Image: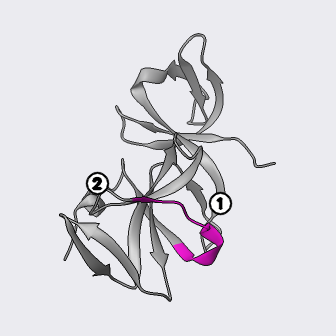
Amino acid sequence: MREIKFRAYCKVSKDMFPVLSLFLDEAMVQTDNDEYSVYDINNFELMQYTGLKDTNSNEIYHGDIVRLFDSQEAWGDVDGEFVKLPTYTDVIVVWSQIDLGWRAKYMHCSNLFSSNWDCYSMEVIGNIYENPELLKFKE
């Protein structure tokens, strides 16, 4: 069974904190910042741990931007055209309500793919909150 834990990005201070406790009935979150204080959950973006780690043993969370290195050719739909993708692909880790599992969303097209994550070397290169510049598609 995988460990269930969260981290929280504070929209006010623009900092990331590990989450100690969630009080969903009161819409509050307790983080491990200097004061171990409890805050209004609406000031935070929660990111759930996927149970996966990258090649550097960094934990992978929902909303992380991950670089997948693939030894095989990959193809995808870019603006309505089926094209060959680079030998690495940057993806956003998302939860799929349809598949009920963690999936990779290509940043430059609408495809979600079901992944056997063990088939890839992968590296966390950022997340959607702290590194919005990584969301821009580079040709």
Q: Please tell me in which quadrant of the rendered image residue 5 appears.
A: top right
Disc 1 packing (10 Å; few <14; some 14–19; many ≥20): some
Seen in the image, is 41 located left or right of residue 23?
Answer: left
Name the residue carrying label 1: 52
Q: Provide residue 13's location: percent of width, then percent of height.
A: 36, 36
Range drawn in magenta: 112-122
Q: Provide residue 63's location: percent of width, then percent of height.
A: 45, 49
| Residue 27 among those drawn in magenta | no
Foreground residue among 110 and 55 = 110
Q: Nearer the viewer, mark 2 or mark 1?
A: 1
**Mark closer to the chain start, 2 or 1:** 1
Residue at image position (57%, 77%) is 120
Foreground residue among 19 and 95 = 95
Foreground residue among 80 and 19 = 80
What is the C-alpha distance between the residues marked 2 and 1? 22 Å
Q: Please tell me in which quadrant of the rendered image residue 106 appears.
A: bottom left
From this view, report whether residue 33 is shown above or below residue 132.
Answer: above
The extreme right residue here reads 1
**Marker disc for residue 132:** 2
Q: Secondary structure at mark 1?
A: strand
Seen in the image, is 30 located left or right of residue 2?
Answer: left
| Residue 116 among those drawn in magenta | yes
Q: Amino acid at mark 1?
A: Leu
Q: Amino acid at mark 2?
A: Pro
Are the residues at dot 2 and dot 1 in contact (C-beta closer than 8 Å)?
A: no
Seen in the image, is 13 located left or right of residue 118?
Answer: left
The mark total stands at 2
Seen in the image, is 6 located left or right of residue 65?
Answer: right
Residue at image position (36%, 41%) is 14
Q: Secondary structure at mark 2?
A: helix
